[in-house]
Amino acid sequence: MILPALTEATSPLFRPIKYSLFPPLGLATLAAYLSNDDDAAICDEHVERLQLDDEPDLVVIQVYITSARRSYEIADHYRRRGARVVLGGLHVTSLPDEAAAHADHIFIGPGEDTWPQFLDDLRRGAPLPRYVSRERTLAAIPPIRRDLIKRHLYLVPNSIVVSRGCPHVCDFCYKVAFFQGGKQFYTMEVDRALAEIDRLPGRHLYFLDDHLFGNPNFAAALFDGMAGMGRLWQAAGTVKSVLEQPVVLEKAVRSGLRSLFVGFETVNSANLQDQRKYQNIGRDYAQAIRRLHDLGVMVNGSFVFGMDHDEPDVFDRTVDWAVQHGIETSTYHILTPYPTTALYQRMEAENRVLHHDWDLFDTRHVVFKPQRLTARELEDGYWRAYRDFYRWGSIWRGASSKAGLRPRLRHLAYAGGWKKFEPLWDLLIRTKHVLHALPVLETILTGFGSRPASAHRRGYQKATLIGSIQEHEPGLG
Ligand code: B12
Ligand code: SF4
């Protein structure tokens, strides 16, 4: 089972930490459906060299858009050697006919229904060329084969997903197309999710769900169940969930939430309407950040450049805004019309997609004709935004927006840690010692032993919350 390297991750000179963060959870999920006497191995080309001289019966490849070229190369190679090759994942779902030319069987959509069906068909000797997911449930999902994950090669071996999809419909997101033909958003049963969490060693977790807070009842029950586990965790959520679900958010913090990835996407509200990002329209972003900071949760803000209302000043405005509001880390993207998304269809209809070189659909290159910017301005502005946000001067300025020494130190250590020590990350990755940095990450997430500093002062955190944080987080307080 192979996760081929994304094109942007293959530089022989430099290994960014981003590609050694998470193990291939999708493949480990599929491996759980194999039978006990199947002999399986997972290879993640981001962190290890792929041996191409073996002779497996079945080769399973997960294809992303910027790993498509490499995936097809590997697929063709193994087919020449007589192996049966199956392809699935986001890009196969977007462009099944392209993928089918390199595979014996392809899978469209999530694999929990089609993959076990294929394994049955294969054992009966009658597998189909194409499987399309229709039945969307995580009710009977077997425990993920974490024994196949080489934990020491990742900074965050404890990644987990307890849902699939998302309840929203943003134009630029792959998800509507990926989940077409069935439910768009569904969760595990709470007890199963808690059991999966319980199986994870150590303290730190990273939920990779598109929107962990998407079903508030599920989220509340999950966080209640996690409250006594002594975990420390990170996840993604929306501005809307931060503002409209204060009780769920407090439960999340009580169970160990310390950093949240939030899709702000743009500081131009007119863009939100265009992209059907309705859940962000009219929301007070600053209040969402304050609320998270008051609860001791760091914010990773995600922003997309190049939407139709963006003009050349958008980069400086976005960075200034983020720094001024004390956002700890920012992730920037150049708007990218992924095939089959609503955005792609709109851009194609307007004749604005520049080419179909999938390698460049990595959100770092301009692959469409922007409206109020030139492609050059957009690409330069994107890189400048990263440089400006992660200058020491900006990091200091962001940190000094915090009340108290520990939150400031935490901001400095977290923001600086990701972007200012890249040669050190490179060394740790090459020497296969990256997991040794996890205790440092945990220390920073706990705020060097601090507790949510200004929550009490601002008055919307209940005394019980602080009480239970002290109870469950020995390092806090
Ligand atoms: C982890 C992750 C990464 C890792 C990927 C490596 C890894 N170790 O997995 C890293 C950090 C490298 C990464 C990078 C990027 N990512 Co990313 N990432 C994710 C994330 C958060 C989790 C993936 C995951 O583990 N999912 C859980 C497992 C269970 O699901 P799964 O992997 O999809 O597998 C299921 C199905 O796809 C299917 N399946 C998959 N393969 C196969 C094969 C077969 C044979 C079968 C039967 C089924 C099957 O079955 C599995 C079980 O249901 C997703 C969001 C998400 N929640 O999925 C975004 C996501 C995939 N990333 C996204 C983006 C935008 C990016 C970046 C472009 C960001 C950037 N600017 O750098 C880059 C480049 C990606 C690219 N070029 O396409 C987008 C997708 C973009 C797209 N192609 O449409 C997503 C969906 C986030 C989002 N909501 O926008 N990412
Ligand atoms: S909220 Fe995020 S995951 Fe959900 S549709 Fe929008 S971009 Fe996609």
Image (cartoon, rainbow, N blue to C red):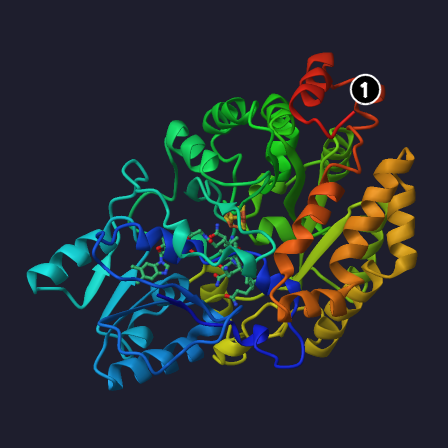
* Badge 1 amino acid: His
Please state, as top left, top right, bottom left or bottom right, where the N terminus lies in the image: bottom left
Judged left or right of residue 411, residue 38 is left
- Residue at mark 1: C-beta within 8 A of ligand 2: no
Judged left or right of residue 189, residue 376 is right
Q: Position of residue 386 (x, y in %)?
A: 77, 64
The one of 349 and 401 positioned closer to us in this rendering? 401
Q: Is residue 401 above or below residue 149?
A: above
Could you say whether the residue bearing mark 1 is in a helix, strand or loop?
helix
Please state, as top left, top right, bottom left or bottom right, where the C terminus lies in the image: top right
Q: Is residue 395 above or below residue 449?
A: below
The one of 38 and 188 positioned closer to us in this rendering? 38
Residue occupied by mark 1: 456
Judged left or right of residue 147, residue 127 is left
Look at 70% across and 49% down and name the residue there.
301
Q: Position of residue 28 (x, y in %)?
A: 38, 54
